[in-house]
Image (cartoon, rainbow, N blue to C red):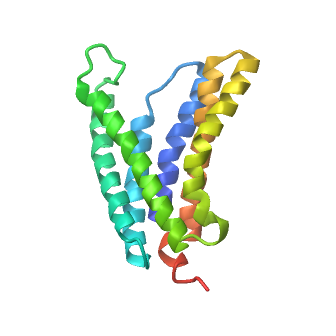
Amino acid sequence: MNVAGALIALGSAWILAKGILLIFTGHDRSLVPWFGLFVMSGFVVASMALWRTAHRWRWLAWLGGGAALVGVVSAVVAVVYLLSGTIPESPGAPALVGGSYAVMSAGVAVSLLSLGVLVAGNRSLRGGWRWYPLGLIVAQLPIFIVAGAIAIVVGSEDLADGLGLAITGLAWILLGYAISEKSLSTANQNRT
């Protein structure tokens, strides 16, 4: 399995677990820093592969990789605080904790967008898979709208949040699969 895809899938499993735990226990566990750490590490590896194989817009690999590196550093800060029992909602949490979450989230967004454009433009994934990273950005809002509608019918806020997170986790795991199985580093070379 491709390292980038494996890291992205592993990070995504943390969001899936967070959603499932929220649905079944009603307790919101702080697993986002683990998602950020592994997904951002996967984006760093993917950006290096894309930089080597892209025939145009290579600067997007630098942008995505740079944002991912900043995201990794922010995720490490968040994980260190998390291991000490501090999350942004903790009483007296330093501003650095909330800041690390914000920078990590921005890193995910910038990396996914820039690498998604690069993948689509260079056909770095075969077939319709080349559109999946950009589709993942577009799908986030509808995922949470549908989860919210289901929760209104059922009458559970935990279900809304948990279902949205679980579906998001599955969608990101599928991104890891796409990158692994469709091979970012070789798809460009195998184009006809």
Q: Residue at x 57, y 70 (%)?
A: 125
Q: Assign the C terminus to one quadrant of the image.
A: bottom right
Q: Residue at x 33, y 47 (%)?
A: 71
> Is 182 displayed left or right of 10 in the figure?
right
> Is 83 displayed left or right of 153 in the figure?
left
Q: Residue at x 60, y 61 (%)?
A: 131
Q: Residue at x 62, y 33 (%)?
A: 144
List x then y, in percent, for residue 60: 38, 64
List x then y, in percent, for residue 148: 66, 26
> Is 151 displayed left or right of 79 in the figure?
right
Occupied quadrant, residue 43: bottom left
Occupied quadrant, residue 157: top right
Q: How many marks?
A: 0
Occupied quadrant, residue 21: top right
Residue furthest bottom as drawn: 192
Front residue (pair 92, 29): 92
Say if 166 sits above or below 3 in the image.
Answer: above
